Image (cartoon, rainbow, N blue to C red):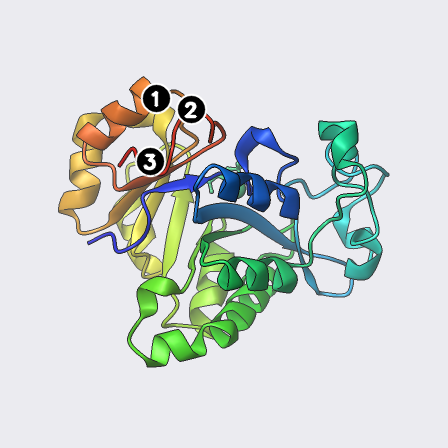
Amino acid sequence: MWPYPRILAHRGGGTLAPENTFAGLRRGMDFGFRAVEFDVMLARDGVPVVMHDPYLGRTVSGAGHVFDYDALELAQMDAGSWCGADYRGEPVPLFVEYAQFCKAHGIWMNIEIKPARGFDRETGETVARITRAMFADEITAGQGERAPLLSSFSLAALQAAKDAAPDLPRAILMSELPPGWEPLARSVDAVAIHANHSHLTPALALAVRDAGFGLFCYTVNEPARARELLAWGVDAFCTDRIDLIGPEMA
Ligand code: G3P
Ligand code: MG
C-alpha cells in the first residue's frame, strides 16, 4: 500500500544542516538517506523555489516576502549563515535544480506545496506541472512509485495539482485530523494522509489505514516515538534528527 521509502529527512537534512538547501541533501546522503521532504513556493516571477517561510529573515538574510523577489534574486541570497558560518553563501535552491539533484542521486521526494497566502492554485499547478514533466518517463513505464508524492495543507493547491497532473499522487497534510478528514482527503483523491504525530492515536492510525489511505507523520525526532508509531502501523515519517533515526529503522 505504501510503495515509497518509510523514513525521510525533513526539509532536506533535518536540523543537521540549513533547511531546504543542497547542503541539507548532502548531509542526508552522508547519513544514508535517499528520501526527503522539502517545501516549495513561488517567487515573484512565478518560478518555484525551495523555501519554508513565506518571508525572509529567519533562514534567509534580508527582509520582505518571498514573492517580493524573482527566483534568481533569491538564488543569490544567503540561506545558510543562520545555521553556522560553514554554510555561509548556501543559496535558496530553485525547485527545478533541487528536484533534478534528487532525481540524479536517487533521492525520492515528498514535495510539500507551500503556497504564500493567495497563491494556492498557482503554486499547486506550477509544482505539479513541472514535476509531472520531469517524471514522465517513469510514469509511462509504470514506475510511478519513483515519482514524487505531492503534499499540502492547502486543499486549493492540491486541487490545482490534481487538475494539472491527475496521475501524480497527492497527500493531504492535516495537523490534527478533523471529524470530516475522510471526505476531505477523497475530495482531492489523496492517496495518503500526512498528520502531525503528536495528535495521532492508535485508533486514528487504524481508521486511516482501514479507509485505504497511506499514513505519514511529521516530524518525529525521538527514536522511541518513531518505533511506537511504526508499531501503530504508520507507513512513513520524516525526521529532523537524521543522526538519531536512520533510514534503516523501518
Ligand atoms: O510535510 C510535513 C511537514 O514538513 C509539515 O510542516 O511546517 O515543517 O512544513 P512544516
Ligand atoms: Mg514541510
Q: Is mark 1 within 8 Å of ligand 1?
A: no
Q: Label 2 vs label 3: CA separation?
A: 28 Å
Q: Nearer the viewer, mark 2 or mark 1?
A: 2
Q: Label 1 vs label 3: CA separation?
A: 24 Å
Could you tell me if the residues under marks 2 and 1 are in contact, i.e. CB atoms within 8 Å? Answer: yes
**At which x and y percent is residue 168?**
39, 67
**At which x and y percent is residue 16?**
58, 30
Q: Label 2 vs label 1: CA separation?
A: 7 Å
Instruction: Identify the secondary structure beneath mark 2.
Output: loop
Q: Amino acid at mark 2?
A: Leu
Q: Which residue is found at the position 40% from the left and 65% from the top?
A: 147
Q: Nearer the viewer, mark 2 or mark 3?
A: 2
Residue 76 visible in rendering: yes
Q: Is residue 84 left or right of residue 1?
A: right
Q: Which residue is found at the position 61% from the left and 57% from the top?
A: 98
Residue 153 visible in rendering: no
In which quadrant of the rendered view does residue 176 lie?
Answer: top left
Q: Is residue 125 left or right of residue 54?
A: left
Instruction: Identify the secondary structure beneath mark 1.
Output: helix
Residue 111 marker: none
Residue 223 marker: 1
Q: Amino acid at mark 1?
A: Pro
Residue 244 marker: 2
Q: Amino acid at mark 3?
A: Leu
Label 3 CA crowd tier, 10 Å (few <14, some 14–19, many 20+): some
Residue most toward the left?
210
Q: Is residue 210 left or right of residue 223?
A: left
Q: Which residue is mark 3?
A: 177
Q: Which residue is found at the position 43% from the left and 48% from the top?
A: 35
Could you tell me if the residues under marks 1 and 3 are in contact, i.e. CB atoms within 8 Å? Answer: no
Sooner in the amino-acid sequence: mark 2 or mark 3 = 3
